[in-house]
Image: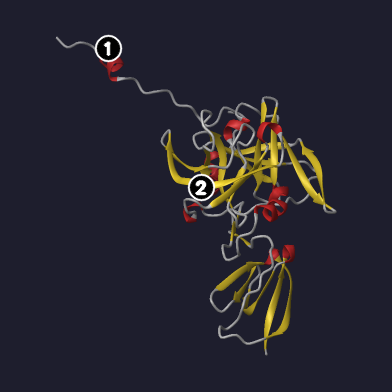
Amino acid sequence: MAPAEVIQLKDKAYVAGKILAEKRDQVIVDLGFMVLAIPRNQILKISKEEMAEPKARSAVSLKPAATVMTESPGDLYQSGKSSLAEKSVRDLVNQLGEAVVQVRTPGGLGSGFIINEDGYLITNFHVIEGETQISVEVYHQKDDQLERKVYKQVSIVAMNKFQDLSLLKIDDKDAPKFARVPMGDSELLAVGEKVFAIGSPLGLERTVTEGILSTKTRQLQGELYLQTTAQINPGNSGGPLFNLRGEVVGVTNMKLLFGEGLGFAIPVEAVKYFLKHRDSFNYDNDNPSNPYRYLEPPSRIRQAKAEPKKD
């Protein structure tokens, strides 16, 4: 028997291994086959247990639970650790559904998802285009029940019309710490892999649709999208597309109206780039029609007409 540290994580998960280093913001654990950095804010407690000595130096034991997340300084989002096993859509919906929200404006509604416990969330630009009166409907988990709460103090932080992305923030004074979802890596997806979407199609909040990834590189209007058979309908716009590890791999934003099973999502890499460079996309209250719309350059014909004739 050999002693090993057991790290109790949130949502009833735990990791057993040898602690190599304890830092202010993370704990480094040797699992035998890999070294894992666990954020402090995901740890409930650390204890020692006697464990059978395996051939490998240590072992990892995981119960079905939330994906372990790591956060980079200055980023608003967390990245999931892909070392955890895939789970059923049913389990993941119970785990992640609290962080998927409905975004409402006087002109319509869409979906969104919270990426930060302080109330930062992602949705599509076209969901809030031309609007400043925005409300967000959240279902909080309380005593094994969902409690509906509408937040009306919502500000626009940044937006990119050309990528169809917007970053919002819930500013209500009574707002709690919010449940959030981790970002995945759409580059690691394989065609045929199962994915699922959560959103509010036609205003029917918390609707779940499941499908597969049809292709990772569908070119539409000069941009590459994830194509999926998961049903995407009006109201789904801005909602998350998840893999079976509970990570966001895309932002649903459109479908082809003349066919079924032809839904599209913005790859999560575009979302990460948007968030890392959000200062460049900051919303300006003095110029609410941001991003700028540039006039078309004059054509050669117009230029030729404007030029004086030579004798």
The local crowd at label 1, few if under 14, some if 14 to 19, many if 20 or more residues have their Cα within 10 Å, is few
Instruction: State the quadrant of the C terminus.
Output: top left
Judge whether 258 appears above or below 80 on screen.
above
| View extreme (left): residue | 311
Amino acid type for the residue under numbered disc 2: Leu
Label 2 secondary element: strand
Question: What numbered label is drawn on residue 305?
Answer: 1
Q: Which of marks 1 and 2 is nearer the N terminus?
A: 2
Residue at screen point 58% across, 34% down: 125
Residue at screen point 62% across, 55% down: 246
Residue 230 on image: x %, y %: 57, 42
Q: Is residue 160 visible?
A: no
Scheme of colours in the image: secondary structure
Judge whether 262 appears above or below 77 on screen.
above
Label 1 secondary element: helix
Residue at screen point 55% across, 44% down: 278
Q: Which residue carries the number 2 mark?
A: 213
The local crowd at label 2, few if under 14, some if 14 to 19, many if 20 or more residues have their Cα within 10 Å, is many
Residue 96 on image: x %, y %: 69, 51
Residue 195 on image: x %, y %: 57, 49
Q: How far apart are marks 1 and 2 (CA)?
A: 52 Å
The one of 283 and 21 positioned closer to us in this rendering = 21
The one of 155 and 143 positioned closer to us in this rendering = 143
The part of the image, by quadrant, that contains residue 164 is top right
The part of the image, by quadrant, that contains residue 287 is top right
Q: Which of marks 1 and 2 is in front?
A: 2
The part of the image, by quadrant, that contains residue 54 is bottom right
Amino acid type for the residue under numbered disc 1: Lys
Q: In this view, does 112 lie to the left or right of 249?
A: right
Instruction: State the quadrant of the N terminus.
Output: bottom right
